[in-house]
Image (cartoon, coloured by chain):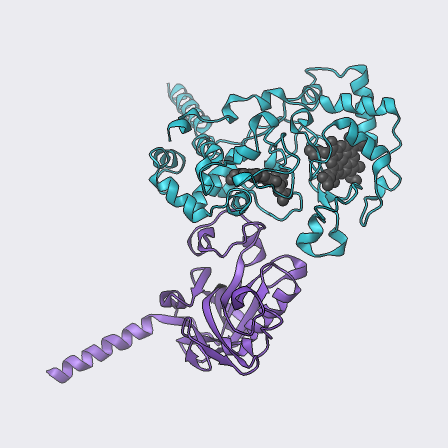
Chain colours: A cyan, B purple
Amino acid sequence: MYKTIIIFIAVVFLLGCVAYQPQKLPYPQHIPASAYNFKENNYKEEKINLGRFLFYDPNLSADGTISCASCHSPYNAFAHTDHNLSHGIKDQIGRRNAPALFNLAWHSSFMWDGAIQHLDMQALAPIEDEREMDSDISQVVAKLQKSPIYPELFRLAYGSNEISSERILKALAVFQLSLTSFDSKYDQVKQQKAIFTEQEEKGYQLFLTHCNTCHTEPLFTNLDFANNGLPLDTTLRDYGKGAITLQAKDSFLFKIPSLRNLSYTYPYMHDGRFSKLSQVLTHYQKGVQKTTNLHPNLANGLPLTANEKVDIIAFLLTLDDAKFVFNPKHQFPKELINN
Amino acid sequence: MKKCLVFLFLLANFVRIFAQQQLNFQINWENEPLILSKNYFSNFNKDSLKIEKLQFYVSDICLLKKGKIVYKLLPKYKLIDLENPNSQQIKFKTKKKFDAVQFNLGIDSLTNASGAKSGDLDPRLGMYWAWQSGYINLKMEGHSPICTSRNQFFQFHLGGFLNNFYAIQKIQFTVNQQNMNVKLQIDKFFEQVNLSQQHEIMSPNQKAVVLSQIIANSFKID
């Protein structure tokens, strides 16, 4: 009798533990641990939802025309395809190509030049840039306070309907953290749910030889900065990280982008100079310029034959994650239409 | 009876003073409180100038005894604003004996590189660089005819938390009393900075570090 009661209590307790498990960013086993500190910004469904509203809301810009999604579209893996340089408020042209946004929980510095050290604070940059959204966070707080939908969304996310800059920034961050892309053919191969074709396998081996030092699997970036030998565009004179740190050793270094979802994220590079993967491979094969701080692996370009380039591209396409790109949970919240 | 009341009143005040200690941050021009937008004359620059904004962060204020920290004041981060007298005083209560006070001018690296914050660290307060990470440790803006900039405007946004341009300054004073008045003698700054050559700093760099040191050396206590 006692035994059954004890077992019953134990079962209830265990069930309770399972039910009260704090929510966690899900990712598969072949992926290393994420870097974002969720202790200061817990991962929560309602907060992700609030962040999604904010991400798609043009009210974050001065004249109500530009949202984050204007430059980071879900169908482009949250990059921007139409333009090589991003387009902001009143059709002003920015300095750089909008990067894709996914797997950001693994990153610890942001922007092509690493100007930003924490995802929470990143959103201030576009909100306040006069060529992007040309607003400021106080204006955003004031606008949202007047909105009919936000107080309730904040209450669900945080327990009270207070709207503050901290809460806005954290919700935007958590939404972006929820954008994980680990369901490509490559991932299925890693989980033994699929196999590469012969050509993809050849491309994979070539990739490991030539590209993996910088575009390290399984994130396909080592999250560091490098000079991959792009000739300087003299109309932009963009020195990347060097312009932020003012150190010669950082000149021409740019954040190494992930190579997941390349079919959706063209054009490529910090200034969107290439629109096709074949151009990118031709660059590595024979376009590399010996500018300051060129990465030693690329000193003589990469010895790739025409066939090898095609094989590498075949492999790169196995990194496309259509389930991520078309995931309805990441898309425009329809309730915003009437706001 | 009346005398008795006066005595009680004094006693009460005495107790209160003892219970509540205070650290004041004053901003002075030649030993007088600096007045917003008032014209002052800088001998070094040989011209007039007026200060229209002056805000700075102090953080990790603590009391020391023989070089060891005995008490940490709260809040951990405090934005001192010329326009807001309330921001210039920090009340605290401790029975601990101390012989020195120490604080940072600016915000530590770890906080700079971490997530969204509220209170005095709320980015709404305009003390955060949006286009890159990091708090502005000190913001001073104003006008002087000697500035060659547009509208003769000067603006010093001093900050930087990465190794190479680390602008945060640790400041320490010995003290021998319960209430402390830390004074920023801003006139001293303009005795060392040539406004005709230097009137705009808007990002972390070597000059920001040098000017932050000049500011740090312009503090005194009494």
| Of B164 and B9, the residue lying toward us | B164
Is A63 displayed left or right of A284 in the figure? left
Query: Which picture quadrant has residue A326?
Result: top right
Q: Nearer the viewer, residue A199 or B29?
A: B29
In the image, B176: left or right of B5? right
**Placement of the N terminus of chain B among the 4 image quadrants:** bottom left
Res B151 seen here: yes
Instruction: Say which of A67 and B29 sits in front.
Output: A67
Identified at 82% across, 47% down, the residue is A291
Among the 4 quarters of the image, the one containing residue B21: bottom left
Looking at the image, the residue that sits furthest to the left is B1
Q: What residue is drawn where x is 80% and y is 49%? A: A293
- Rendered position, B152 above or below A10: below
Where residue B34 appears, as percent x and y from the top left, is: 42, 75
Residue A211 appears at what percent x and percent y?
Answer: 79, 33
Give the position of the C terminus of chain B as an image quadrant: bottom left
Q: Position of residue B49 (x, y in %)?
A: 49, 75
How many numbered discs sit on the rendered protein? 0
Return the residue nearer the eye: B202 or A49. Answer: B202
Q: Is residue A22 visible?
A: no
Task: Identify the residue shown where x is 59% and y is 23%.
Answer: A325
**Residue A95 on image: x %, y %:** 64, 44
Residue A185, quarter of the rendered image? top right
Q: Is residue B92 above or below residue A309?
A: below
